Amino acid sequence: MPLVLNDDDVARVLTMKDCIAALEDAFREMGLGGVMNAPRRDSFMLASRPDAYYSFKTMEGGLESLGVVAQRINSDLITHPLIRHRNPGPLDQVRERWFCLRF
């Protein structure tokens, strides 16, 4: 039975310390060949807004020792807003926190 979690669900139950410990275990198991890991897939297409495009990303992985497989799905409407009357560069995007509009 699938368990669907959003970012808030994960933040309520997983501390950074627990996350790092789980990642260390997973990478150790990866070195032993007990991991299924698919590369991230990114799909892009035009959006209904003329100033944006749609992005859909997925990635999957599994650990044999735990008998689990997980998939992360990300759906974004990507925009490049004007900041101070010009298109932002990567540093402006970080400084201004303008990455995307989520829906």
Image (cartoon, rainbow, N blue to C red):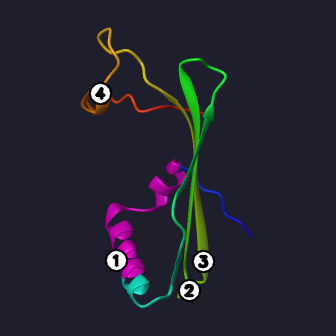
**Region in magenta:** 7-27
Checking the image for residue 37, the label placed there is: none
Checking the image for residue 64, the label placed there is: 2
> Are dots 2 and 3 in contact, CB under 8 Å?
no
Helix, strand or loop at label 3? It is strand
Task: Name above or below for residue 40 compared with residue 21.
Answer: above
**Which class describes the residues within 10 Å of circle 4: few (<14), some (14-19), or many (20+)?**
few
Q: Quadrant of residue 98?
A: top left
Label 3, label 1: how many angstroms apart (C-alpha)? 16 Å
Task: Name above or below for residue 24 compared with residue 33.
Answer: above
Residue annotated with mark 3:
68
Residue annotated with mark 1:
24
Q: Amino acid at mark 3?
A: Val
Q: Is residue 63 left or right of residue 98?
A: right
Q: Mark 4 or 2 closer to N-term?
A: 2
Q: Mark 1 or 4 closer to N-term?
A: 1
Residue 58, position as x, y percentages in the image: 58, 55
Label 4, label 3: how many angstroms apart (C-alpha)? 40 Å
Q: Nearer the viewer, residue 90 or 99?
A: 90
Helix, strand or loop at label 4? It is loop
Q: Is residue 60 magenta?
A: no
- Quarter the N terminus occupies: bottom right
